[in-house]
Image: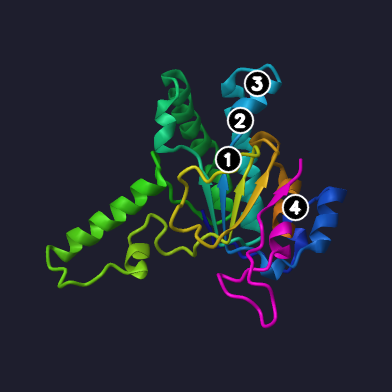
Amino acid sequence: MKSHSTISVADPSALGPVTPEEAQLLTKLDLARLPRHVAVIMDGNGRWAQRKHLPRPAGHRSGTQTARTTIETCARLNIEALTLYAFSVENWRRPKTETDFLMQLLREYLRQEMPLIQRNNICMRFRLNYGGRAEIVDALNEIIAQRNGDSRNRPVTEEEVARHLYTAGLPDPDLLIRSSGEMRVSNFLLWQIAYAEILVTETLWPDFNRERLLEAFVEFQRRERRYGGIREGGSDSEVPARVAGT
């Protein structure tokens, strides 16, 4: 998602009515220092449904409402890009009934959410059957094809690879959020998240509401981003990833 909303990032009222908890979080946020690109691994739909003694599709359907809230909130806060991990290459290993439902749910979601997308001036770019390793392989194959056999002993550069990734033209993610407590990146944006701040929350995706998202932004702004460097007289150890609570 790339937002071109005209709402000022300095205006908390851009979110409309907020709960007391959300208002408290907004007082802690510097809205001029929000992440430019937020990436989200939306995990926990099935477990959410299981805990409520519901079929797995109910969890996926509830998760689409969380996605809607996340998209709208990021657009209203002028987050430049939002990447949601919806369906991976590995997800095809799931039962056919579930993958068929997910494809149908995606079609329904796009039809229903088009007014929201247009209202918030959002440009959506998506690619199904995603895998981080496959993305890098695709980029290298495109580079080879464009060189047409004339490599002239030139090494492939990071900049050249970046220009051929699916996210070309977007900044690398500043913040990677994973719901459901799993401590892995699951083949998601492997190249792009090299210096992303990673936040893992125990909250299952259908329960990841606007308050949880604002909490993630507050935590992001607490981090010291050094990109491998250190401040004068500072420690050279990396800041450990923190785990957000429920």
Residue positioned 21% across, 72% down in the render = 154
**Depicted 215 relative to depicted 91: above or below:** below
Amino acid at dot 2 = Asn
Can residue 97 be found in the magenta stretch?
no
Mark 2 surroundings: few (<14), some (14-19) or many (≥20) residues within 10 A: many
Residue positioned 57% across, 47% down in the render = 40
Position of 129 with respect to 185 (left or right) is: left
Measured in 3D between alpha carbons, the distance from the residue under mark 2 to the one under mark 4, in whole angstroms, is: 20 Å
Amino acid at dot 3 = Gln
The residue to which callout 1 is attached is 42
Measured in 3D between alpha carbons, the distance from the residue under mark 3 to the one under mark 2, in whole angstroms, is: 9 Å
Measured in 3D between alpha carbons, the distance from the residue under mark 3 to the one under mark 4, in whole angstroms, is: 26 Å
Amino acid at dot 1 = Met
Image quarter in which the C terminus is found = top right
Amino acid at dot 4 = Glu
Measured in 3D between alpha carbons, the distance from the residue under mark 2 to the one under mark 1, in whole angstroms, is: 8 Å
Task: Assign a secondary structure to mark 1.
Answer: loop
The residue to which callout 4 is attached is 215
Q: Earlier in the sequence, mark 3 or mark 1?
A: 1
Measured in 3D between alpha carbons, the distance from the residue under mark 3 to the one under mark 1, in whole angstroms, is: 16 Å
Task: Assign a secondary structure to mark 3.
Answer: helix
Task: Assign a secondary structure to mark 2.
Answer: helix
The residue to which callout 3 is attached is 50
The residue to which callout 2 is attached is 45
